[in-house]
Image (cartoon, rainbow, N blue to C red):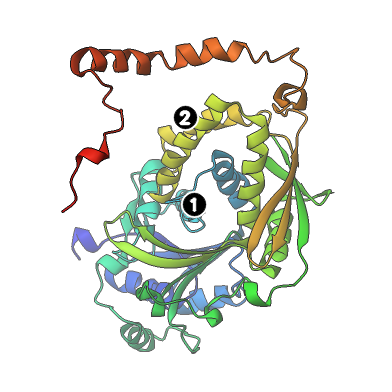
Amino acid sequence: MSAKKSACKVVLAYSGGLDTSCIVPWLVENYGCEVICFCANLGQEEELSGLEAKALASGASKLYIEDLREQFITDFIYPTLRAGAVYEREYLLGTSFARPLIAQRMVEIAEQEGADAVAHGATGKGNDQVRFELTVMALNPRLRIIAPWREWHIRSREDALKYAAEHNVPVTTTLRSIYSRDRNLWHLSHEGGILEDPWQEPEEEMYQLTTSPETAPDTPEYVEVYFEAGVPKRVNGEALGPVELVTRLNAIAATHGIGRIDLVENRLVGMKSHGVYETPGGTILYRAHQALEQLCLDRETLHYKQMIALKYADLVYNGQWFTTVREALDAFVNVTQEHVTGSARLKLYKGNITLVGRRSPYSLYREDYATFGEEDVYNQKDAEGFIKLFGLPLKVSALLDIEGTGVSKYHSPDYSKFKRD
């Protein structure tokens, strides 16, 4: 057997679906290795019982199933939320930051088991392969990375079913959805099917988390979210742990059709893709967090934070979680969030979120500063000198224009001189 096709022990990111079930015997057959499967529970709501028997029947030596939901929220979702990171204006990065966590734990298991390689089921034309592999390279570059979709000859579901039958891989026969989906506690994504034509309106039957805005309750619901240092802690006055908090907000928002996003995005690998995302609770959290920052951050900090949020989103989307630059941005974000403590109140109604209140003990908004009443703090006469200094570059530029041409370059032309054809 060639060196290319040689490995002793491989840890596989395993879901129990058709693709990863086929990967188990394929690794044994093509690499002559022991296969250890790892499945992370990130709130995907898929049936995990019976998964061990299925993995063993496919040829694996063992299966790890681990509940990583709380770590997912505290170590990946909340830092991204506090940074205000949104990819291409709308995507709240639900799949993006799940992959580094899965890969991180996969590497840890590989080290624990003495494995010399890891494997994943991501295709060769998507973003996930990058996210998995960059994480492995950052955490343990000595581990070999095997990506079957870039090697094998399986190219369709029919090919995979045939391979599974030939290798006695147990496959649950279900009607396959026309959509490719990824779900976790934060979101549900949809790709494929009629979404391949971005002109087509998504069919209502596609959505699985959120109620249609048209059939949502006719009465608005108010929700209050309390944050401490930029981290959500309470919903409607009730203290909740990370998993319970996100789950609660998902249920509340989904009832009112909140969190649907339709996006044509730029994949890292160079192509555009059309996807629809359902992120009900996350949409509430982002809106509430932004509202609180309006009160608590000064102008220069808020404006600069908006710029780094774009970079942070790119890093997360591109799988560059375990990088120095992301850690450096987190250090900046941590300082900005020291006083982001308080509550935001939102009104939910038929797919819409309306901000109706925010308060904080660290609020920089002061009615006595902003009012046009007493001038103990703000003297309106001071504005004259400020405006003269602020506009000085404009004044100097206009004076130079007038000296040269007799008129400022921004002076409106006399349109009466132009003849109409």
Q: Residue furthest right?
A: 237
Q: Which residue is mark 2?
A: 328
Give the mark nearer the N terminus: 1 vs 2. 1
**Residue 261 appears left or right of 236:** left
Disc 2 secondary structure class? helix
x 44%, y 50%: residue: 87
Residue at image coords 65%, 15%: 380
Residue 269: name its quadrant. Answer: bottom left
Question: What residue is at 33 percent from the left and 57 percent from the top?
Answer: 267
Q: Is residue 345 visible?
A: yes
Q: Amino acid at mark 1?
A: Phe
Q: Which mark is residue 154?
A: none
Q: Amino acid at mark 2?
A: Ala
Q: Residue at x 46, y 54 (%)?
A: 96
Quadrant, the N terminus? bottom left
Question: Relative to residue 29, is residue 9 drawn left or right?
Answer: right
Query: On screen, 148 above or below 401?
Result: below
Question: On screen, 239 above or below 367?
Answer: below
Which of the 4 image quarters holds residue 392?
A: top left
* Crowd band around label 1 with a 10 angstrom C-alpha radius: few (<14), some (14–19), many (20+): many
Please name the residue that numbered disc 1 is placed on.
Answer: 97
Mark 1 and mark 2: Cα distance apart in space: 17 Å
Q: Is residue 227 left or right of residue 66?
A: right
Q: Position of residue 292 (x, y in %)?
A: 67, 39
10 Å neighbourhood of mark 2: few (<14), some, or many (≥20)? few
Q: Tag count in the figure?
A: 2
